[in-house]
Amino acid sequence: MPKRRNIKRDIDYFLEFSLFLEENERSPITIKNYLCDLRYFVKWFEVETGQIMTPDLITPIDLRQYKRYMNDILSLKPQTINRRLSSLRSFLRWAVISHLLPDDIPPSVPKPIPEVKKGPQWLDKNEQHALIRMLQRGRNQRDLAIVTLLLNTGLRVSELCDLLWSDIVITDRKGSLVVRSGKDGKRREVPLNKDARNALNSVGYAENEGVKEIIFQGQRGKMTARGIESMLKKYVGHTKLSGVTPHKLRHTFCKNLIDVGVSLEKVAMLAGHNNLETTILYCTPSQLDLEKAVALIELDD
């Protein structure tokens, strides 16, 4: 068993690594995942070696054994294993910058496990209509407006939660919203179609135009990503739409644009993608797309 844990040492490691990630403009969700991944490794390392983990004790053998442990013993998915290895790579990079390694050379992290990447998951038109129908029956204008905006703007849920009334401009025939700080701190402007404009008007745009206040409020103030996820679960329950998340609605926005022939460059700008490789994923055909494709060559009866 490892020696008695140095609580202050642990707090310093995790806190300083977290600050390093913040300085490199990692999102709060990414930071949370990195720290969680690091805790899994620390637990394994200390049980496996009988020593309290410090960066200078980590060797390439440890990292290879940890990869085998995740793959052979835990049977984790390649995506999870690769993410945890990536988190460790970032941690060791921070250890070098912080001069916590004797030679300022991090141990080599094993290569990721090759995996067949699946396309993003989205809702087809029937599923979109079913979801909107549930929200309309619920008669909560705020909830309906949130889902309508996600489907028609492709905002990340964190971007939606941060929206102020002053970020919105609506006229009789058009409108736009400004994402002040998207991924990597990037600012972008997103046009508002009729559905999005109607959604914002339904929750009080006219009365709050130009006001620097959060648009979507919960019982305890500003709505959070978790709050919106819970709201969606409340509506879909145990239906076939039970896997609906804010991010799936963002994927649906991108897929809808691709399906009506919008160019990849425009989709990338609207969604705030850093490169076209991310956007190209939305060209990946779904099973329904494939079924429609083969149906086109059916012989007439």
Image: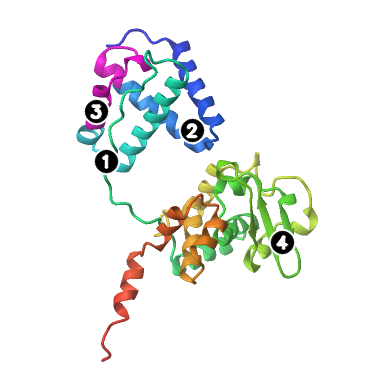
Category of crowding for the residue at label 2, using alpha-carbon neighbours closer than 10 angstroms: few (below 14), some (14–19), many (at least 20): some
Residue 294 seen in this snapshot: yes
Task: Say which residue label 1 marks.
Answer: 113
Q: CA distance from mark 2 to mark 1?
A: 22 Å
Residue at the farthest top position: 4
Can you give x and y, in whole percent of width and height, for residue 62 in the image?
26, 22
Category of crowding for the residue at label 3, using alpha-carbon neighbours closer than 10 angstroms: few (below 14), some (14–19), many (at least 20): some
**Does label 4 or label 1 sit earlier along the sequence?**
1
What's the residue type where badge 2 is placed? Ile
Task: Say which residue label 2 marks.
Answer: 31
Tell me which corner region of the image, top left, top right, bottom left or bottom right, holds residue 286: bottom left
* Camera-side mark, 4 or 3: 3
Image quarter where the N terminus lies is top left
In this picture, residue 33 sits left or right of residue 208: left
Q: CA distance from mark 4 to mark 2?
A: 35 Å
Magenta highlight range? 45-69
Residue 202 seen in this snapshot: no
Residue at the farthest bottom position: 301
Identify the residue at image location x=53%, y=66%. 133
**Does label 2 or label 1 sit earlier along the sequence?**
2
Callout 4: SS: helix
- Indicate which disc residue 201 carries: 4
Can you give x and y, in whole percent of width and height, for residue 248 in the image?
46, 54
Task: Say which residue label 3 marks.
Answer: 64
Can you give x and y, in whole percent of width and height, for residue 238 in the image?
41, 55
Callout 1: SS: loop
What's the residue type where badge 3 is placed? Arg
Callout 3: SS: helix
Q: What's the colour scheme?
A: rainbow
